[in-house]
């Protein structure tokens, strides 16, 4: 797709839009019906983040139009649900009481990839901290020495360990292995810890097929072959690359995205599932606090710290978690290469919590609308500047030039959504995800918010006349044909053109006009005559 798009001159200056259905979990009640499509998201996040738009669409009749609006607004990764555009944002998991995995002592726990660091660390933790007493360690033959050393170590901790020369990506071999688990100690948990293939300098670092086989094929076989068993846990060790992409190892990112989706897919079927998209771990010989800051805004986790996060994750209710450590200073500064997804994790140092408005909803609206007429517009512009400064990490809103375009200020789809969320909370208004990119700069957005709030709180004959005057001025710019279409649409709105008044849908018209630019208003008028 990328090669053909880049080679065809007809597509110069355009971006392909890849649309999936059921690939991502965007809101409560969603079902991830297509984990394979989720793998495509991970792959394209790595190979075409700047050139490709990723969108997951539902079947609602309003969603295709919302999809087109989101693409026009410059969003690059989003889901559309019931006509609403939703952009992924990474947030802190809420504090909950955790009791551990609750694995029965007489059950067997299967660990694949046990010769790798993640698999071995998990096996040790389950035995030493969580009381697991029977482990089945599965690895292909070449890794047997490392697996045997781990088995000896675990036996010293009091566990009964069975070694299996088995490649979980081989479905038939895996089925034989599972059938051999003794009935008196049935399989009660699965831990899948796929290991990266070794190239030893003989091939490219990213061999997509070689990366996907031990991750995706093995995970799917484990899912299919165990879904009728009474499992207490089904843990999938993945990577942060699935969320952020990895240009050097696109296959790894695709596999990690698949694991996230598979855990959510299982949960929707009433099965246990937990995917852990790990951030980087420090070198095995490093001290727990020796993780260095990285260009992507992360800090490597020391193993004790990572294992503590594993303990917590095993007792949490979520299907997919991202255990990592963040270089918050780098994220606040907006250093080059910092993953945009991390912006939502940065805490405002002045408030000690994620950046958000000090006041919300009616309180802000009443205060701003009570200001003298000549002060209101500046107050709304300052509200936008304050939100932009907090999201971009500026200490002073004065650093935000109200006349500078949002894109020139450094906004992308995630920071734009963060500002929208702040303004929605502050004003109590229902604001679209494309709000920021629908207005050229903070000054224009501030004026727009003032208009919306005044409409929301004060509808008078004078305000109606003011809007009519505004429409009149815009109509003067149209040719005769378009003015005739606009006039017909206005007659319908006034009740003169529709036989059934209930078909006029005035509330919908108010909503759409309330969040529209002038260009969108003309488009809406044109579309209205075709309904």
Image (spheres, rainbow, N blue to C red):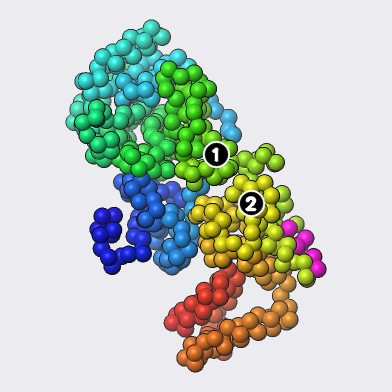
Tag count: 2
Q: Position of residue 42 (x, y in %)?
A: 36, 45
Q: Residue furthest top?
A: 156
Q: Which residues are magenta?
A: 364-372
Q: Is residue 333 left or right of residue 130?
A: right
**For this rendering, which residue is in front, 69 or 389?**
389
Q: Secondary structure at mark 1?
A: helix
**For this rendering, which residue is in front, 158 or 227?**
158
- Up-down: is 351 above or below 514? above
**For this rendering, which residue is in front, 275 or 390?**
390
**For this rendering, which residue is in front, 47 or 219?**
47
Q: Which residue is mark 2?
A: 389
- Up-down: is 102 above or below 416? above
Residue at (49, 26) in percent of width and height = 291
| Residue 455 placement: quadrant | bottom right
Q: Which residue is mark 1?
A: 330
Q: Position of residue 524 (x, y in %)?
A: 50, 77
Residue at (35, 51) in percent of width and height = 48
Q: Secondary structure at mark 2?
A: helix
């Amino acid at each position: 797709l990328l090669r053909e798009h880049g080679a065809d001159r007809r597509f110069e200056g355009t971006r392909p839009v890849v649309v999936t259905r059921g690939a991502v979990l965007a809101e409560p009640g969603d079902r991830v019906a297509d984990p394979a499509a989720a793998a495509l998201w991970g792959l394209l996040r790595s190979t075409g983040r700047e050139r490709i738009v990723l969108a997951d669409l539902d079947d609602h009749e309003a969603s295709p139009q919302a999809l087109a609006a989101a693409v026009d607004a410059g969003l690059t990764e989003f889901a559309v649900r019931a006509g609403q555009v939703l952009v992924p944002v990474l947030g802190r998991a809420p504090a909950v009481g955790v009791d551990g995995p609750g694995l029965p002592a007489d059950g067997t726990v299967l660990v694949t990839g046990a010769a790798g660091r993640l698999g071995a660390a998990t096996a040790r933790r389950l035995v030493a901290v969580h009381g697991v007493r029977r482990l089945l360690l599965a690895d292909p033959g070449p890794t047997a020495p490392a697996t045997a050393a781990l088995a000896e170590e675990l036996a010293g901790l009091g566990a009964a360990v069975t070694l299996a020369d088995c490649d979980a990506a081989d479905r038939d071999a895996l089925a034989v292995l599972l059938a051999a688990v003794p009935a008196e100690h049935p399989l009660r948990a699965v831990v899948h810890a796929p290991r990266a293939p070794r190239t030893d300098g003989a091939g490219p670092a990213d061999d997509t097929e070689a990366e996907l086989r031990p991750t995706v094929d093995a995970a799917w076989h484990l899912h299919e072959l165990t879904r009728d068993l009474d499992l207490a846990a089904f843990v999938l060790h993945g990577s942060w690359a699935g969320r952020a992409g990895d240009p050097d190892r696109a296959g790894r990112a695709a596999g990690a995205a698949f694991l996230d989706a598979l855990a959510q897919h299982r949960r929707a079927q009433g099965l246990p599932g937990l995917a852990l998209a790990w951030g980087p771990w420090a070198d095995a010989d490093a001290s727990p606090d020796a993780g260095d800051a990285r260009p992507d805004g992360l800090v490597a986790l020391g193993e004790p710290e990572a294992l503590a996060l594993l303990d917590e994750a095993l007792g949490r209710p979520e299907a997919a978690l991202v255990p990592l450590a963040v270089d918050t200073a780098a994220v606040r500064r907006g250093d080059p290469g910092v993953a945009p997804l991390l912006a939502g994790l940065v805490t405002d140092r002045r408030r000690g919590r994620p950046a958000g408005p000090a006041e919300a909803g009616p309180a802000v609206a009443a205060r701003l609308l009570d200001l003298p007429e000549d002060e209101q517009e500046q107050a709304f512009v300052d509200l936008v500047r304050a939100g932009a400064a907090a999201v971009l990490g500026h200490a002073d809103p004065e650093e935000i030039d109200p006349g500078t375009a949002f894109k020139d200020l450094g906004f992308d789809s995630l920071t734009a959504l963060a500002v929208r969320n702040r303004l929605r909370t502050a004003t109590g208004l229902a604001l679209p995800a494309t709000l920021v990119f629908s207005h050229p700069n903070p000054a224009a957005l501030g004026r727009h918010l003032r208009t919306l709030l005044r409409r929301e709180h004060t509808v008078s004959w004078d305000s109606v006349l003011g809007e009519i005057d505004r429409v009149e001025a815009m109509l003067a710019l149209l040719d005769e044909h378009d003015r005739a279409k606009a006039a017909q649409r206005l007659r319908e709105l006034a009740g003169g053109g529709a036989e059934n008044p209930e078909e006029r849908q005035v509330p919908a018209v108010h909503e759409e006009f309330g969040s529209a630019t002038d260009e969108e208003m003309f488009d809406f008028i044109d579309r209205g005559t075709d309904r």
